[in-house]
Image (cartoon, rainbow, N blue to C red):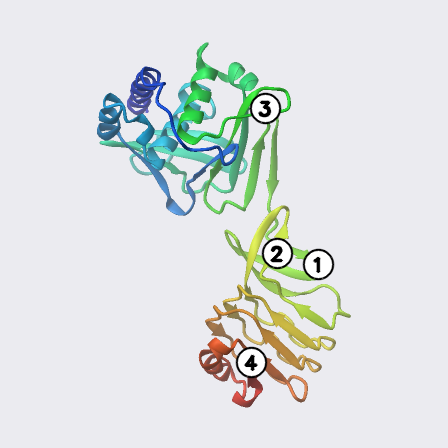
Amino acid sequence: MKKVQKTIYRMLMAIAVGFFMFSGLKTTALAKSDEVVIDLSQGKRLVYDLTKYRVMIDDQYLRYYDDDAQKAVVMSLLITELNFGTARDPKTLQGYEDMIIDYSTDPKQYVVYTLDDNIYVAAGPDSVGTLEATFTESTLKKMGNYGDSPEYVLSMMDKFFRIVCVNENGEKYFKLKIRFNNPNAAFVKIDANGNRSVLIADKQFSENGYSYTVTGDDEVAFTGITKKSMKTVNIPSTVTHQNITYKVTSVSDKALYGNKKVKSVTIGENVITIGKSAFEKCKKLKKVKVKTTVLTSVGKKAFKKNADGFSVKVPKAQYRAYKRLFKKSGLSSNKIKK
């Protein structure tokens, strides 16, 4: 752990020298937001090439750092300048990790630093959710290890990302978001005063009379309805719950099996799969409109024993492909319209 800490310190010292030496360099980028997002989900990692960027500083090319290098610097600044996070013994993980920094223990949110010819920054394998933190000049002064820490950190964020803004109190500030595995599973928020709040995302929920189950980072399955009197069902392309927007990508097995009220169903634009017996024995179901153009699977008996005159209307461009899908599920071809 000491080896990687020393290397990170040397890296930042080199950057500091290069940064202040060439602080007159101008960038043409405009601030698009007040937040930098570091995405470490799904096995993503940051790579900082020690040899490459030392040379680039000497050559006055600080502004040409690639995105990975810039964000690796930011992650390192959190440790060296701000004491943001807690160092932990790397022996608690299998492998050759050189340093681990904890941000949250419940839910688990930590970053692993590994050193060879490069510095690698990755999320811990069981880290989940998203960390959101706001830093102002006041909080930076409280957190900083050195007198010039606030100025240094703000200058770096402005130089690299052009995200430093001014709040209603006239203070400079920026926001940081770190996405770990399954980013929507939980949200840890640290406000400008250092107050911490945690939101654990629901795995199952209902919105506007429809029920859903979370199936992926940004995806849910439609699982049924909560109002038994409902006659028209419009499965949406997206649904928002707890300020998280999910794509509705599937209809679960037996979602409306045996329903006695529903007469029409619209399948949303993001649905990829329709489960087995999803609409089987919906005795009054007569019309189904398929909006999605990305459907790849229709389960057995998805539409079986429905109302007389039952039909499924599909997009014209997908008629041939969808006809095969629905026939394979057991639906007669004369019930498939375009």
Mark 2 surroundings: few (<14), some (14-19) or many (≥20) residues within 10 A? many
Q: Where is residue 153 in the image (x, y as percent from the top left)?
A: 44, 21
Residue nearest the viewer, comparing 43 with 265? 265
* C-alpha separation, residue under disc 3 versus residue under disc 1: 36 Å
Q: Nearer the viewer, mark 4 or mark 3?
A: 3
Mark 3 surroundings: few (<14), some (14-19) or many (≥20) residues within 10 A? few
Classify mark 2: helix, strand or loop: strand
Relative placement, left or right, of 53 versus 84 is: left
* C-alpha separation, residue under disc 4 versus residue under disc 3: 55 Å
* C-alpha separation, residue under disc 4 versus residue under disc 2: 27 Å
Relative placement, left or right, of 271 versus 61 is: right
Q: Any mark on residue 239, and which?
A: 2
Mark 4 surroundings: few (<14), some (14-19) or many (≥20) residues within 10 A? many
Label 1, on which residue? 208
Between disc 2 and disc 3, whose residue precedes?
3
Q: Residue at x 52, y 85 (%)?
A: 330
**Dots 2, 1 in contact, CB < 8 A:** yes
Q: Which of marks 1 and 4 is in front?
A: 1
In the rendered view, would you say 261 is above or below 147? Answer: below
Q: Nearer the viewer, mark 4 or mark 2?
A: 2
Label 4, on which residue? 301
Q: Position of residue 168 (x, y in %)?
A: 64, 24
Q: Where is residue 162 in the image (x, y as percent from the top left)?
A: 45, 29
In the rendered view, would you say 336 is above or below 11? Answer: below
Label 3, on which residue? 194
Q: Where is residue 119 in the image (x, y as percent from the top left)?
A: 29, 31
**Dots 4, 2 in contact, CB < 8 A:** no
Image quadrant where residue 67 sits: top left
